[in-house]
């Protein structure tokens, strides 16, 4: 089971039909026991002062209810039956204690059962809790009946509300997991697309110089091999993201460092292997950036270089500049290719530009991309550093 789908519920943890965590069960027991002792226990002691012979039995029945509540999170139906029987017995011993108060522990058990068991089960339990209603009518008249039915229905409704709240949280968690996996898939797509584009260009360059410059051809082939290994590693990452979790006794394989501006030179080297000149400039300290900003900046440079390789006709030089200025990081990628419609339209590099704009939007930055008046194409992004985790 995906661990990311498991969220601890503070009071009634666990999905319907499953046992909550031991910590949640203890918290629930302590809270409910304190409430029963404070309300019912006090009433029994006060009322039982006038019936000394019945007081020990009534106190014992209250303690039975408190002890039974220790299992309410794991067996709410059984605890409901036990506490209801004990509560009616307390009321029979001391009629001055209201039936509603005597059945307080049973109402707590009904609330828990309503929260963690299917609705058809809790609905039957609600009907069962309504059976003592005639007793409350006989003891307190219409007012006593109304109070009893109201507290029972409220206990069941509170459980239903808690169940709906937990289901909503679980649904949001699942949706967040799906979105995160989709982001991982897009990340892998970007990396693999860039790597394969470079490999295609390198393969063509190797073919061109295979006879005349064998050493340069070997360099291109080695770059192709390195790129293929990198692409395979990213695909393995995708499979791990969509596959089952690895156990504690996994293979222990060391993961390759993730995309980061610290690896900008490696990215530039893969493009240089195609024969294109790449100049990288850094101004200011770019270490210690928030992970989201670091990754977004790297991906923007990567996509811009990929677009240059694919769509910049006649380009043989590209410059990359990363500037840390105050609370922002500015990333600029400029090539000297001929401006073409595919560079800024909806085809070709358009998909890459959409991806860059989305990355910039997610971190609250701005992006400018378009042809330059004197020729060439510029991608400029400004990413805020503060307020991004």
Image (cartoon, rainbow, N blue to C red):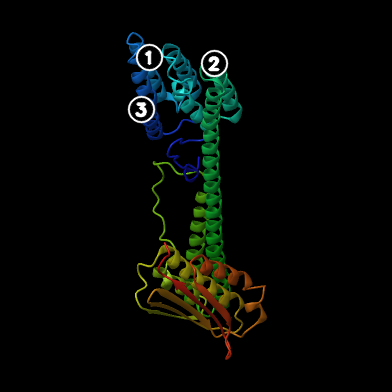
Mark 2–mark 3 distance (CA, rounded to whole Å): 26 Å
Report the residue marked by disc 2: 138
Residue situated furthest top in the rendering: 53
Vertical comparison of 371 with 238: above or below: below
Front tag of 2 and 3? 2
Mark 2–mark 1 distance (CA, rounded to whole Å): 21 Å
Front tag of 2 and 1? 2
Report the residue marked by disc 1: 58
Vertical comparison of 256 with 119: above or below: below
Vertical comparison of 263 with 172: above or below: below
Which numbered dot is residue 304?
Answer: none
Nearest to N terminus: mark 2 or mark 3? 3
Q: Secondary structure at mark 2?
A: helix
**Residue 194 location, x and y as percent?**
54, 68
Residue 28 lies left or right of residue 350; in this view the side is left
Mark 1–mark 3 distance (CA, rounded to whole Å): 15 Å
The C terminus - image quarter:
bottom left
Q: What residue lies at 54% left-to-right and 63% top-to-bottom?
A: 192
**Residue 298 location, x and y as percent?**
46, 69
Pointer 2 with pointer 3, Cβ within 8 A: no
Marks counted in the figure total: 3
**Residue 81 location, x and y as percent?**
49, 18
Pointer 1 with pointer 3, Cβ within 8 A: no
Residue 54 lies left or right of residue 383; in this view the side is left
- Judging depth in this view, the residue of 127 and 387 nearest the camera is 127
**Residue 146 location, x and y as percent?**
56, 26
Q: Residues within 10 Å of mark 2 (few under 14, many from 20)?
A: few
Q: Secondary structure at mark 1?
A: helix
- Judging depth in this view, the residue of 13 and 153 nearest the camera is 153
Report the residue marked by disc 3: 38
């Amino acid at each position: 089971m995906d661990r990311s789908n498991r969220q601890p519920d503070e009071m009634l943890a666990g999905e319907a039909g499953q046992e909550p965590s031991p910590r949640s069960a203890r918290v629930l027991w302590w809270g409910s026991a304190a409430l029963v002792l404070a309300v019912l226990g006090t009433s029994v002691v006060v009322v039982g002062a006038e019936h000394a012979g019945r007081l020990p039995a009534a106190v014992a029945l209250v303690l039975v209810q408190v002890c039974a509540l220790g299992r309410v999170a794991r067996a709410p139906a059984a605890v409901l039956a036990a506490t209801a029987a004990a509560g009616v017995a307390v009321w029979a011993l001391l009629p001055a204690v209201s039936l509603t108060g005597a059945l307080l522990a049973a109402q707590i058990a009904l609330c828990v059962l309503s929260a963690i068991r299917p609705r058809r089960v809790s609905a039957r339990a609600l009907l069962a809790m309504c059976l003592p209603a005639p007793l409350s009518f006989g003891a307190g008249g219409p007012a006593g009946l109304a109070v009893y039915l109201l507290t029972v229905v409220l206990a069941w409704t509170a459980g239903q509300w808690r169940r709906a709240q937990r289901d909503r949280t679980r649904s949001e968690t699942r949706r967040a997991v799906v979105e995160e996996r989709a982001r991982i898939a897009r990340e892998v797509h970007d990396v693999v697309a860039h790597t394969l584009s470079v490999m295609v260009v390198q393969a063509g360059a190797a073919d061109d110089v295979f006879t005349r410059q064998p050493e340069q051809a070997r360099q291109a082939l080695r770059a192709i091999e390195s790129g293929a290994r990198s692409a395979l590693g990213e695909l393995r990452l995708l499979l791990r993201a969509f596959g089952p979790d690895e156990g504690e006794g996994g293979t222990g394989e060391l993961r390759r460092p993730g995309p980061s501006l610290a690896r900008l030179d490696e990215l530039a080297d893969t493009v240089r292997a195609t024969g294109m000149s790449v100049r990288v400039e850094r101004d200011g300290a770019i270490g210690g950036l928030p992970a989201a900003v670091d990754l977004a900046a790297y991906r923007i440079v990567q996509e811009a270089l990929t677009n240059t390789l694919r769509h910049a006709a006649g380009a043989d030089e590209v410059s990359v500049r990363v500037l840390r200025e105050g609370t922002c990081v500015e990333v600029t990628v400029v090539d000297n290719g001929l401006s073409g419609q595919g560079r800024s339209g909806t085809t070709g590099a358009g998909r890459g530009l959409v991806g860059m704009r989305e990355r910039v939007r997610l971190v609250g930055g701005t992006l400018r991309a378009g042809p330059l008046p004197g020729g060439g194409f510029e991608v400029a992004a400004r990413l805020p550093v503060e307020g991004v985790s």
